[in-house]
Amino acid sequence: MTARPRTTGPFVAIVTPFDAQEAVAESALRRQVARQAKAGNGVFCGGTNGEFYTLSLAEKVRVAEICVEAAASMTGVLAHIGEISTHQTIALGKAIQGLGVRAVSAITPSFIACSQGELEGHYRRVADALDVPVYLYNIPARTGNTIAPETAARLADHPNIVGIKDSEGSKASLDGFLAVAAGRDDFDVLVGPDSLVLHGLQNGAAGSISGLGNVAPETLNGIWTAFTKGDHAAAAAHQERFSDLRATLYAHGFPPTMVKCALRAVMPDVGPSRGPALVTAEVEAKVAEIARSFAEATA
């Protein structure tokens, strides 16, 4: 197994750009990676905001390959490998692990209702099968399965499980995993909800993986940079802007679709979300105005 690298700081769950025929727009993806690196953020590819649920296995591998190539030595890349079955998750992990990603992360299986024992067995098999470090990924609203803190604590003892991305959405959930990580130097928590980035950092999180960072990369990085410098007022101001943007934007629809729509308003080459996601002309106009107003206010 590879030695455990510590993953710290802000990462962005980068969008997967598509062209007019809904094929992966490789040049646009490279530009997005470079944009995040310039802002000081790492890249998490093939995640929820990367529309992994619409990508084929070959596309997921290609997206990871492009992100690693585009990042070069500028920034780190994490990749999502979660699938419905343990077998599929391992297969995708094996296809991606040799590309140069720093680590991989896997959501809980979806559709299949899993006991905590089944989730533990799933992640142990994945971690046993791969050489690259593995992060758990808790996002019950999308999968129907929740990792309990007690299960995470047992999995934290696995030599190839290095942490968890928690996207449950509440302070209570995040604090439960932060309690597991407290006092350990081999299990890190990465904050998923954009409204809780600063709360997580203040309570021991190693970093964050943000969808909204696609729209506001400098604001996301500002939270981390100000926090690490001890400038608590600036960190709180950045977090307030980030949280306000999140609340305004997500009021209009499915968050990953809204993120893509807002980004497209200022960078059209990222293209639309893949179907069946649909943004009406009315919503698109409202989201575009939100994106442009935010860009002007933070310029």
Image (cartoon, helix red, strand yellow):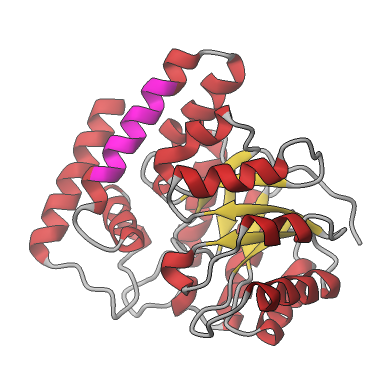
Instruction: Report the quarter where the C terminus lies.
Output: top left
Instruction: Work out whether residue 185 can be spotted.
Output: yes
- Residue for point 26% across, 44% down: 247
Q: Is residue 24 left or right of residue 269?
A: right
Picture coordinates of residue 103 (x, y %)? 73, 57
Foreground residue among 205 and 66: 205
Query: Residue farthest to the left?
Result: 282
Rendering quarter of residue 284: bottom left
Magenta highlight on residue 131 = no
Instruction: Work out whether residue 42 can be spotted.
Output: no
Q: Is residue 236 left or right of residue 120?
A: left
Magenta highlight on residue 240 = yes
Q: Is residue 150 above or below residue 40?
A: below
Q: Is residue 86 above or below residue 268?
A: below
Picture coordinates of residue 249 (x, y %)? 24, 48
Foreground residue among 105 and 281: 105
Q: Is residue 68 above or below residue 25?
A: above
- Residue for point 80% across, 40% down: 184
Main secondary structure found in the magenta portion: helix
Instruction: Report the quarter where the N terminus lies.
Output: bottom right
Rendering quarter of residue 275: bottom left
Q: Which residues are magenta?
A: 236-247
Picture coordinates of residue 15 (x, y %)? 44, 59
Foreground residue among 21 and 220: 220
Rendering quarter of residue 61: bottom right
Q: Is residue 228 above or below residue 289?
A: above
